[in-house]
Amino acid sequence: MTSQRTLNRLFTLHSWAGIVTGLLLFIVCFSGAVVVFKNEIDLWANPSLAKLPRSEKPASLDAVLTQLQTRYPGATVETIALPDAVNPSYFAFVRERGAPANTRTKVALRSDTGTVVGPVDSQLGQYLRMLHVFLFFGPRWIVGFLGAAMLVLIATGIVIHRKILAELFTQRWGRSFRVVMSDLHKSAGIWGLGFHILIATTGAWMGLAPLFEQGYKFITTPAAMAPSQPVRKAEGSEPALMQSLDAMYATAQQAVPGLEARYVSLRRWGTGTAEAGFTGNLRGHLASTARVEIHAVTGVPKKVHDPRTAGFWSLVNSLMEPLHFGDFGGLALKWLYFFLGMTPAFLSISGTLIWLDARQQRRREADAAHPESAGNAIAAG
C-alpha cells in the first residue's frame, strides 16, 4: 500500500513534470496527431498532384532518373520516392547547381511515364513532420526526452489515481471548474492509457536510442583505432558508367526478399564511388527499416540490413516507426491514431489549467486565512 507521503511526492512530480514540459508536449502531440495524414495533407495542399493518373505498372527508375537529368541538367538527384498507396506519383529531391547546401527542390513526376510535372508547390505535410520530430530547431533526442517525460507522467498518474475503474466513468459536470477538468483529465488519460504508453515508448525509443547507441560505440571503440583512409579525390571524382537503377533494385530484392523500396538515395552519382541505397518496408511484415546499399559501378551490394535476421533489437527498432505513426493499417487506423493522439494534447492543456486553478485557490484560501496581511499588502501596493 502506497503511503500518503509517497503519493504526495508523486503528485508533486506529476504536476511539475507536466508544467515544465506541457507546452512542448502539446506541440509534439498535436502535430503528431495531424501528421499521420502527412501524405494526404501534401495532396490536399497540391490539388494538381491528386489528379495525376495512378499506374498499375509504374515507369522504370531508369526512366525517372533520365527525365530528371534531362529536365535539370547539371543538378544532383539525391532521392527518389516511389509511388505508394496514397501518393500516385514519383517524387524526387534535386539539388540544383549553385543552390545552397541545405536547399533542395521537391519535384513530382508522373508514375505512368516518368515525365517531370514540376516542383511541388507546398510541403505542408513535411513541415508538420519536421515540427513533430525535430521541433524545427533541435535534435531528435529532445522529442525523445519528451516521450520519456510522458512515460513518467503516465506512471505517476497510474499510482496517484488508484481507483482507475471507478474514475473511468466519473464525470461531475455540475461541480467547480477544477473538478470538471480533473474528471475529464483522469477519464481521458485512462481511456487512452494503452495508446499513450505505445506512443510515449516508441517516441522515446526513436529519439533516445540513437543517442545511447552513439555513446556506447564511443565508449567501446578503442581510442587508438586508426580511422579508415579517405578515398582519394581522383578516384572519387572520375566519371564512371553507372549500373541500371532497376537492375540494382532487383539485386536489392534478392538480397532482402520481400523488400518494397519507398526511397532510392543516390550518392556521388556518376563517379567511381557512387552508391545507390534502397530503403523501405518488407512485404507482409511490419518492419520499416530494411535497407540495401549497392555500389553503383559494379552493381554489387555493399551493405545489407534485413531487420528479420539482424537480431532482436534491430527487429524492435524496425517496428517503432510504424507503431508510432500508424501508417500500416490504412485510413481507418489513421483516424484512430488521430483521435487518440489528440488526447495527450488535451491532457497537457487540462493539467496546466487544473494546476493554475489549484494555485489560485490556495492563494485565495491564504488571503482568507490572513485578511490583515492581504489588506496590508494592498495598502502597500
Image (tube, rainbow, N blue to C red):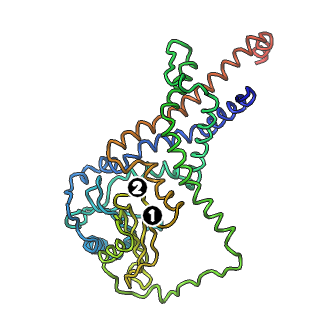
Query: Label 1 near label 2: C-beta < 8 Å?
Result: no
Q: Nearer the viewer, residue 253 or 43?
A: 253
| Picture coordinates of residue 96, whole percent (x, y) | 38, 70
Q: Which residue is mark 1?
A: 308
User: Residue 34, located in which quarter of the rendered image?
Assistant: top left
| Picture coordinates of residue 378, whole percent (x, y) | 75, 15
Rendered-image quadrant of the N terminus:
top right
Q: Residues within 10 Å of mark 2 (few under 14, many from 20)?
A: some
Element type at marker 2? loop
Please state if 270 lies on the left or on the right of 185 as rendered.
left
The extreme front residue here reads 1
Q: What residue do we see at 47% from left, 68% from top?
A: 101
Q: State whether residue 335 is above or below residue 207.
A: above
Q: Which residue is mark 2?
A: 286
Gap in angstroms between the C-alphas marked 2 and 1: 10 Å
Q: What residue do we see at 51% from left, 58% from top?
A: 317
Q: What residue do we see at 58% from left, 57% from top?
A: 209
Q: Amino acid at mark 1?
A: Arg
Q: State whether residue 228 is above or below residue 33.
A: below
Please state if 300 lies on the left or on the right of 25 as rendered.
left
Rendered-image quadrant of the C terminus:
top right
Q: Earlier in the sequence, mark 2 or mark 1?
A: 2
Q: State whether residue 42 is above or below residue 300.
A: above
Q: How many marks?
A: 2
Marking on residue 75:
none
| Picture coordinates of residue 223, whole percent (x, y) | 71, 76
Q: Nearer the viewer, mark 2 or mark 1?
A: 1
| Picture coordinates of residue 219, whole percent (x, y) | 69, 67
Q: Nearer the viewer, residue 140 or 328?
A: 328
Please state if 145 lies on the left or on the right of 284 as rendered.
right
Q: State whether residue 226 is above or below residue 205.
A: below
Q: Amino acid at mark 2?
A: Leu
